[in-house]
Amino acid sequence: MAAYPSNIALGIDIGGSGIKGAPVDLETGTFFAPRHRIPTPQPATPEAVAATVAELVQHFDPDGELPIGIDLPAPILDGVIPSMANLDKSWAGVNGDELFANVLGRPVTLVNDADAAGYAEVRYGAAVGRSGLTIVLTLGTGIGSALVVNDVLVPNTELGHVELDGYDAETRASSAVYEREKLSYKQWAKRLQRYLSYLEGLFFPSVFIIGGGISRKSEKFLPLIDTRAPLIPARLLNTAGIVGSALLAAEAVGRAPGTITPLPPLPEKADEGRKADAPRRTKAKKVGSRKKNTSKAGKFTSESNKGNRSKQSSTSKKDKVKKAKKKQKKA
């Protein structure tokens, strides 16, 4: 195989159903060669998954030229995986750095899958050029999160597990819940509204990036949500994990690209779910107009008033008759 250019790194995304990888052009955030996918072994033990990753590496980089970044659906603490949600439970406590280094014969960079996807969106996708704090949320089986402050990743945030109504937020507002409970977009948007408002109160981000497969239909639900920070659909979609892993691996070994060319911006209407500073539309009230009271209470009040008026009229007639009789007697 011909030597790779210096701006290429290998990204590998480990998921519950498939393990995917591709060499990434770090200047553009695009695949240098077509993605290759191998089904995740079952059971997905550390040894079985590492062997599958070795197949991918052999497919793309048998000569060991490229930095390798690997993302996992788990937090990573100094290379150690403290817990695992979507793979075999035997991952808990495993030193992932050592596991993959021993199998591959070279060091790798391990990263949480949502962190990898979020970092890719900030460097190449929806949040390019935005200063301050960016929160990237991936809506799927659960809710993954990434926090990036001025292009610096804050790892392992796990914001899908913040408490909402006494439950993990991802059990109330993930896209899996939307599908399982057969919610309308409006109903689901109300749950996302509560969740995003809560995060906004904690962090005051400059922007929210909403990813996951459901983000392809972002125009159906993002305009129904009202936040101070803009809500923007993710751009890289299912390539984000591979791209982010590759970039983080290159940066870890000092091979980060000197120049990055991000995706071109979307037209303004498609770029943001709702502008944060857009005024809300309200219906003008007619001055001086009164609605006709059609309620039962209103009818009851009107009928009572009519009765009172008729009683007053009857009383005044009797008084007149009495006065007339008195005059006749005097005469």
Image (spheres, rainbow, N blue to C red):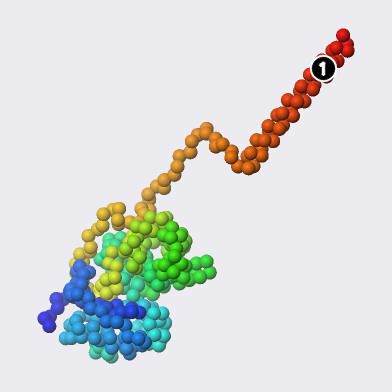
- Residue at point 36% right, 54% down? 274
Relative placement, left or right, of 1 versus 224 is: left
Q: Residue furthest left?
A: 2
Amino acid type indicated by mark 1 = Lys
Q: Is residue 179 at all visible to an observer of this figure?
A: yes
- Residue at point 30% right, 53% down? 269
The image position of residue 96, as x and y in percent, is 34, 85
- Residue bearing the label numbered 1: 323
- Residue at point 35% right, 86% down? 42
Residue 139 in the image: above or below residue 288:
below
Q: Residue furthest top?
A: 331
Relative placement, left or right, of 36 versus 233 is: left
The image position of residue 78, as x and y in percent, is 36, 82
Q: Quadrant of residue 159?
A: bottom left
Element assignment for label 1: helix
Q: Quadrant of residue 9?
A: bottom left
The image position of residue 211, as x and y in percent, is 34, 66
